Image (cartoon, rainbow, N blue to C red):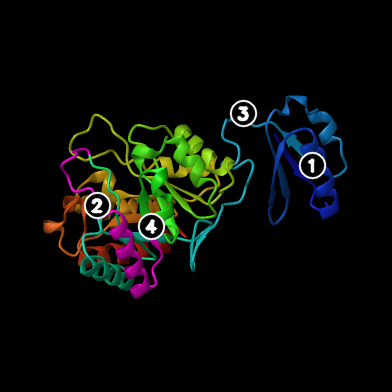
Amino acid sequence: MIAVLKSDVTDEQIQSLTGWFEEQGLQVHISKGEFQTIVGLIGDTSRIDGDLVESLDMVESVKRISEPFKKANRKFHPEDSEISVGNTKIGAGNFAVIAGPCSVESEEQIIAVAESVKASGATLLRGGAFKPRTSPYDFQGLHEEGIKLLLKAKQATGLPIVTEIMSITHLPLFDDVDVIQVGARNMQNFELLKELGKLNKPILLKRGLSSTLKELLMSAEYIMAAGNENVILCERGIRTFETYTRNTLDLSAVPMLKELSHLPVIVDPSHATGLARLVKPMALAAAACGADGLMIEVHNNPQKALCDGAQSLTPEQFSDVMKNVEQILKVVR
């Protein structure tokens, strides 16, 4: 349930109303916009008389929300959320680009890539320290050493770092990581999501390989319900019957998610297509359809990459993509 308050409501009135709702055993979420204040109620609202609440002088209207995701729901929070990562902002009109190699391989490699993507306009550095691989014989990442190398690249360039977590037991290693990524395979690892909800740190949540948008939003709800509302959604393609691309990039998910939720939505064209030559057109399409950012794999020598070289751009190719994305953004804005 949400209660839309009148524009002239005072802080004292809001506190009084909030206290009454909490006495009924409900969680209260306050969203203050430029023109109105929304009071969202989470819990068993069946005991609340909506007509009674609507009759209060301070209340404009009352609506019940049927969707199971509450905090992620745009009805709870009509204005776009803006997630801050250092000096970088994502969402609410801010377009962010996360770039870097699939896997951190060496200090020389990650710093070289970091310097090149920053020069081209990337605002965050990605790099895998822990790598989920289909085969147990494939390169699994450098683990703790990989995070240390990412931090060195951050020190050298100033770029905030984004890297994927695989297990709750790894959380202490992520204290200095700026954005924790939850990969597609862990999107419904609910125990991990609840632990990440206890942090005051942005979480990049990737859509599962075969997950619906509702399931993605419910996973975001797990994080937000535990207290952390700094969630960024990522469309990275879903598994379909098509075999010419690694996955099928569902760009319709971007406007649909932004209609349903206030959370920022970015697109990963690298994992979606699996082919470097398709990254540019899909990145441009993502910018055109309203995405809040991109996540692109860049490697200084894709042919020798230890992971996903086929979908990685060279620094020169990435620079070209960035120039073209900027032109698209000028048009759509």
Residue at numbered disc 3 = 66
The CA span between labels 2 and 1 is 54 Å
Sooner in the amino-acid sequence: mark 4 or mark 3: 3
Q: Amino acid at mark 2?
A: Gly
Q: Which numbered mark, 4 or 2, is in the foreground of this view?
A: 2
The CA span between labels 1 and 3 is 20 Å
Q: Amino acid at mark 4?
A: Val
Image mark for residue 60:
1
* Location of residue 107 with respect to 23 vertically, above or below: below
* Location of residue 111 with respect to 26 vertically, above or below: below
One can see residue 164 in this view: yes
Element marked by disc 1: strand
Quarter assignment of residue 302:
bottom left
- Residue 128 appears at what percent x and percent y? 29, 54
Q: Nearer the viewer, residue 300 or 74?
A: 300
Image mark for residue 156:
none
Sooner in the amino-acid sequence: mark 2 or mark 1: 1
Crowding near the residue tagged with mark 1, few <14, some 14–19, many ≥20 C-alpha atoms within 10 Å = some
Sooner in the amino-acid sequence: mark 1 or mark 4: 1
Residue at numbered disc 2 = 141
Q: Are the two marked residues, 1 and 4, in contact with CB atoms closer than 8 angstroms?
A: no
The residues colored magenta run: 134-162
Report if residue 211 lies within the magenta region: no
- Residue 221 appears at what percent x and percent y? 54, 39
Q: Is residue 92 left or right of residue 111?
A: right
Crowding near the residue tagged with mark 2, few <14, some 14–19, many ≥20 C-alpha atoms within 10 Å = many
Q: Nearer the viewer, residue 245 or 329?
A: 245
Residue at numbered disc 4 = 162
Q: Are the two marked residues, 2 and 3, in contact with CB atoms closer than 8 angstroms?
A: no
The CA span between labels 2 and 3 is 43 Å
